[in-house]
Image: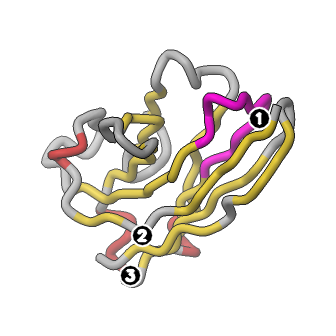
Amino acid sequence: VQLQAFGGGLVQAGGSLRLSCAASEGTFSSYAMGWFRQVAGKEREFVAAINWNGHNTEYADSMKGRFTISRDNAKNTVYLQLNSLKPEDTAVYYCAAAKIADTGRVSRLSVVYNSWGQGTVVTVSS
């Protein structure tokens, strides 16, 4: 599946952004989806994940309560709502897709995801 992420931008601390990730094919609903982020010189970091029907989600501890992952299988799109943004949230945000045998589960591990979008840049100013 091909993925395209968009929605990044420049926002002040405390502000909000909504990232979107559109998938190219109709089997989107068979994939678990994840969001990761990366700062130059650092390893890619797990942000959030959602299973195929949206009934199971997971978040990194530092994002829990501020970020919300959701999906619309009819639109082949996964979203990441970013609220209460902090300067340390500045990063390139990537969406990714994974086939997980247990469809109720999600994964925090980047190696599980075999399709990645190109990334969208989020910059939070202080």
- The amino acid type, in three-letter code, at marker 2 is Gln
User: Seen in the image, is 84 located left or right of residue 63?
Assistant: right
Q: Contact (CB < 8 A) between labels 2 and 1? A: no
Residue 58 on image: x %, y %: 44, 29
Where does the magenta region start and end? 80-90
At a point 37% along the width and 35% down the height, the residue shown is 45
Relative side of 3 to 5, left or right: left
Q: Amino acid at mark 1?
A: Asn
Q: Is residue 80 above or below residue 59?
A: below
Q: Is residue 103 above or below residue 4?
A: above
Other-residue count near label 2 (Cα within 10 Å), few / some / many at <14 / 14–19 / ≥20: some
Q: Secondary structure at mark 2?
A: loop
Q: Is residue 27 visible?
A: yes
Residue 118 bears which disc, if any?
Answer: 2
**Tag nearer the camera, 3 or 2:** 2
Residue under numbered circle 1: 83
Using the image, tell me which numbered label, if any, was put on residue 106. Answer: none
Nearest the viewer among 122 and 66 is 122
